[in-house]
Image (tube, helix red, strand yellow):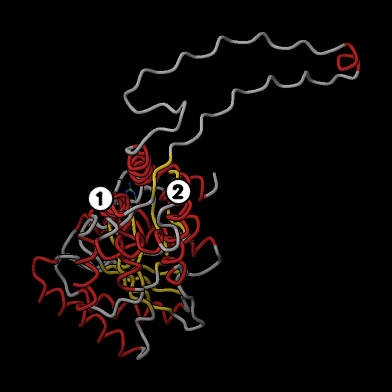
Amino acid sequence: MSFFTKLKDRLAGSSSKIGAGLDALVGADEPAPGAARPGAAEPQAPAPQPAPQPGLLNRILGREAPAPARPAAPPEPRRELDDAMLEDLEETLIAADMGVDTALRVTANIAAGRMGRRVSASELRGWLAAEVARIMTPVARPLPLYAKKPQVVLVVGVNGSGKTTTIGKLASQFRAAGKTVIIAAGDTFRAAAVEQLQVWGQRAGVPVMTAPEGSDPASLAFDAMVRAEAEGADLLMIDTAGRLQNRADLMEELAKIVRVIRKRDPSAPHNTLLVLDATTGQNAVSQVETFRKLADVSGLVMTKLDGTARGGVLVALADKFGLPIHAIGVGEQIDDLDAFDADDFARALVGA
Ligand SMILES: Nc1nc2c(ncn2[C@@H]2O[C@H](COP(=O)(O)OP(=O)(O)OP(=O)(O)O)[C@@H](O)[C@H]2O)c(=O)[nH]1
């Protein structure tokens, strides 16, 4: 299955919410003649027609009989694009977690030059997909790879956002691309997080460096740097704790990791990835604000876009912060994480 097909499938929670919202706001005006209204009695299905028999010549030549003509689809309902409709559109986008500012901007752009026109839900879907793609295109950038060895990738984010899984998936994809990778299990306070990383490391064929429970993550990061340099590893991925409850401690912990790895390489870390969980909706916006204060975030990965109706939050993040979005996750398997593609995402999000 291509990643786009999977994305479309798994973003169904978000796209059906947006799709249903657009259908409802257009259908709220007046139905087109012959179009079914929600709640109205189903029209009688036409009696089945007997299949036409192929003629003698067609039978001799082995041709198929011509397909029976399909009954024409009823015309789509349309509604005049006016202020009331724009308000409904804004509400639909806000309900899909796009955030108020982004929803207002997107709505204004869709309205520009189209006020007074009678529009259908599919037209709206197309314009919305184009707007979303326009916002997302500048931030759709794969994780940059540098010639520098080891390239140090620091991975930050709140507990449960999908850091471990993302590191595992990225590590196995880099391995498959012929890169040598080392993982440092820097959340030394949570034995379960370390164990989970070890499982991912085994699956990916990547060594995972660990330290005794409760020990200093910075000293593990330093040892991991030394080993990665000695072995000539291409990438060192460092997991970190995500205890936002004690922000000052976490800030100090992250700053210390950065300080010690800079003793070995002043240009490290080369990437600081913030992993966000799509199911948290607008909360992801405040997580970006917080983590930008704690660390020099260079790019985002959004996980768990499957099984949520809140995928619109990624549009809000792109619009508000302009940080590169490197990858998105749509499931728990290794191949459920892929580079972020703006057009694919836009079409999948609105069901276009
Ligand atoms: N459905 C779905 N689940 C995911 C995805 N990414 C991660 N998960 C699941 O989310 C849960 C948390 O992921 P972890 O990778 O453990 O998150 P973490 O940030 O490392 O969390 P801690 O280890 O608790 O710090 C796990 O059960 C993962 O399998 C995704 O894209 N889709």
Cα–Cα span, label 2 and label 1? 21 Å
Under circle 2, the secondary element is helix
Crowd around label 1: few <14 · some 14–19 · many ≥20 (10 Å)? some
**From where the camera sits, is residue 120 visible?**
yes
Under circle 1, the secondary element is helix
Residue in the foreground of this view, choosing between 115 and 51: 115
Residue in the foreground of this view, choosing between 170 and 83: 83
| Percent x, y of residue 292 | 24, 76
In the rendered structure, the answer to whether residue 188 lies left or right of residue 113 reads: left
Crowd around label 2: few <14 · some 14–19 · many ≥20 (10 Å)? many
- Quadrant in which the N terminus appears: top right
Residue of label 1: 95
- Measured along the vertical axis of the image, is residue 224 above or below residue 117? below
Q: Earlier in the sequence, mark 2 or mark 1?
A: 2
Residue in the foreground of this view, choosing between 12 and 231: 12
Which residue shows up at 55% across the image and 48% down it?
2
- Measured along the vertical axis of the image, is residue 233 above or below residue 18? below
In the rendered structure, the answer to whether residue 323 lies left or right of residue 291 reads: right
| Percent x, y of residue 336 | 43, 51
**Residue type of the residue flagged with mark 1:** Ala
Residue lying farthest to the front in this orientation: 116
Which residue shows up at 21% across the image and 82% down it?
255
Observer-side mark, 2 or 1, equals 1
**From where the camera sits, is residue 345 visible?**
no
Which residue shows up at 51% across the image and 45% down it?
5
| Percent x, y of residue 144 | 47, 75
**Residue type of the residue flagged with mark 2:** Leu
Residue 7 bears which disc, if any? Answer: 2
Is the residue marked 2 within 8 Å of ligand 1, measured from its CB?
A: no
Q: State yes or no: discs 2 and 1 in contact (Cβ < 8 Å).
A: no
Which residue shows up at 85% across the image and 12% down it?
55
In the rendered structure, the answer to whether residue 84 lies left or right of residue 60 reads: left
